[in-house]
Image (spheres, rainbow, N blue to C red):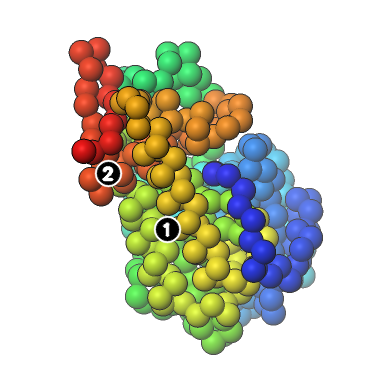
Amino acid sequence: MSMTLDAPAMRFPHPTPPPTDGVPVEIAPGVLWLRVALPFALNHVNIYLIEDGAGWAILDTGLADERTMELWTHVLDTQLQGRKPTKLIVTHSHPDHVGLAGWLCARHDIELWMSQVEFLQAQNLRYNPAAIGRGHHRDFYLQHGLEQSAIDSVLTRGHSYIRMTTEMPAAFNRLIPGRILKIGARVFEIMTGEGHSNEQVMLLCRDEALFFAADQVLAKISPNIGVWPWEPKADPLGAYLASLAKLRAEIDDNVFVLAAHNLPFYGLHTRIQQLMDHHEARCGDIIRGCATRPITVAEVLPAMFNRPLDAHQTGFAFGEALAHVNYLAATGDLTFTRDQDGVMRMAREG
């Protein structure tokens, strides 16, 4: 995730989050908010349970680790007054959201609901060992100037979280943008957005002005927008900015935004503008950094992230830096050149 941004025009009706001890709180009528711990700098993920007839629909899962399994056992056995899970909805394929999908579905005999792209991506990362840390990944980082020691760290400790999932269910129910999903008495419009992931699901109940935003619009941080070795020339930042503009055009500003990290809030349009401004400023920093000489993506990192980065953070930071560079290349503001040693450098166009 990126730098913290102030949001003075936003409103937080629940300024104190629930503890990460498996005790949910009611955040809206028939909606429970559960905060699950993560072993990273971003130390939590928000899980929501939505009233669904006689039971509860679960939105996202947390990582596949012993602590999270114990928390879910506590919640489902003691905190829901005997009301059982009815379905599992997963917003996207990142392990803090899909990690326990297989375990929860098998344990409680419920079905999984995801977008098709995110389901297939989760399957690929789970069952295709070549997708993580092989030779072409090392070449990806080398050609953009990352030092060998940093690459070793990223490809071992930095990518270990990707494996924190249980076996995926063999089948799923596809969530398709533009269609509706009924959960109990509520009708949700299914929306998807790119940038942070390729087909991240968001749910909007217009009648009650509830917007489950997943990681697409967060209150205090920018979601990671990264380029990864399996799609090195991707432009996720361009896709993300287009998604934000679409959300602003299609969703009223009065919705209650229940996101997957940070606090729920009001002020969607304000936050979208802040996120757009943030990425524009980052792009300006990169262009200025190329003013006197061509530089590598690795040389962008200290300017974008002015703090020490651990192995986990370095992988995300590198991907985010390259996302901004690829976006500027797509808009024609930067061009790439390759040295005799194979290292890519970028320069200002013209």
Residue 223 image offset from top left, x and y in percent = 51, 50
Residue 148 image offset from top left, x and y in percent = 42, 13
Q: Could you tell me which secondary element the residue under label 2 belongs to?
A: loop
Residue drawn at (35%, 32%) of the image: 291
Residue drawn at (54%, 44%) of the image: 2
The alpha-carbon separation of the residues under discs 1 and 2 comes to: 28 Å
In the picture, residue 344 is in which quadrant? Answer: top left
Residue 332 image offset from top left, x and y in percent = 23, 45
Q: Which residue is mark 2?
A: 333
Locate residue 165 relative to residue 12 in the image: left or right: left
The disc, 1 or 2, on the residue closer to the chain's N-terminal end is 1
Instruction: Indicate whether 210 appears above or below 58.
Output: below
Instruction: Indicate whether 341 appears above or below 106.
Output: above
Residue drawn at (48%, 18%) of the image: 150
Give the numbered dot on residue 242. none
- Amino acid carrying label 1: it is Gln
Nearer the observer, 93 or 87: 93
Does residue 343 show up? yes
Does residue 78 show up? no
- Amino acid carrying label 2: it is Asp
Nearer the observer, 68 or 159: 159
Given this view, does label 1 or label 2 mark the residue nearer the observer? Answer: 2
Give the numbered dot on residue 200. 1
Residue drawn at (40%, 45%) of the image: 283
Label 1 CA crowd tier, 10 Å (few <14, some 14–19, many 20+): many
